[in-house]
Amino acid sequence: MKILTGNDLSTGDVIWWAGDGWSRQVGESVDVGDKGDDLARAEEAALRVVGAYVIDASRDEGGVRPAHIKDRIRALGPTVRPDLTLKPNDADAGNWVI
């Protein structure tokens, strides 16, 4: 599956395209298929997101998991302050970065 990610223009938060808007939770991501690049350009032009790009991911019973280590870390939140880390539905998410 292909999902769209970027950063919120006003807060800098990592955000994920949820089909009808943006979410801070990777688990709410939807497959954008081959429309991801066009969607990224439109959302950037509307000043809702910066640095939007399409990534590979998979979905299973645990939720959505980005394929690349960089995006797994982005999905989980800051690595230097565990108290600020996002808690995805996937109980095994702590092993994503391994």
Image (cartoon, rainbow, N blue to C red):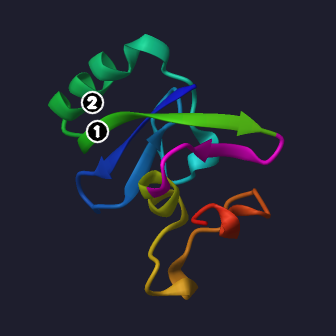
Give the percent coordinates (x, y) of residue 14.
39, 56
Q: Residue at x 79, y 48 (%)?
A: 62
Q: Residue at x 30, y 21 (%)?
A: 37
Q: Are marks 2 and 1 in contact (CB under 8 Å)?
A: yes
Residue 4 location, quadrant? top left
Q: Nearer the viewer, residue 62 or 30?
A: 62
Give the percent coordinates (x, y) of residue 71.
45, 52
Give the percent coordinates (x, y) of residue 58.
64, 35
The correct choice, above or below, for 20 with respect to 24 in the image is above
Reading the chain from its start, which is encountered first: label 2 or label 1? Answer: 2
Q: Residue at x 63, y 46 (%)?
A: 65
The correct choice, above or below, for 87 with respect to 49 in the image is below
Q: Nearer the viewer, residue 40 or 19?
A: 40
The quarter of the image holding the C terminus is bottom right
Q: Which residues are magenta?
A: 61-69
Give the percent coordinates (x, y) of residue 42.
24, 23
Q: Look at the image and say whether residue 44 sits in the magenta stretch.
A: no
Residue 60 location, quadrant? top right
Q: How far apart are labels 2 and 1 at the CA level?
A: 8 Å
Name of the residue lying farthest toward the front: 98
Q: For this view, does 20 lie left or right of residue 60?
A: left
Q: Nearer the viewer, residue 77 or 67?
A: 67
Q: For this view, does 91 lie left or right of residue 69?
A: right
Residue type highlighted by circle 1: Ala
Q: Residue at x 47, y 87 (%)?
A: 81
Name of the residue lying farthest toward the right: 61
Q: Which residue is the site of mark 2?
A: 43
Q: Nearer the viewer, mark 2 or mark 1?
A: 1
Res. 30 mark:
none
Residue type highlighted by circle 2: Glu
Q: Which residue is the site of mark 1?
A: 52
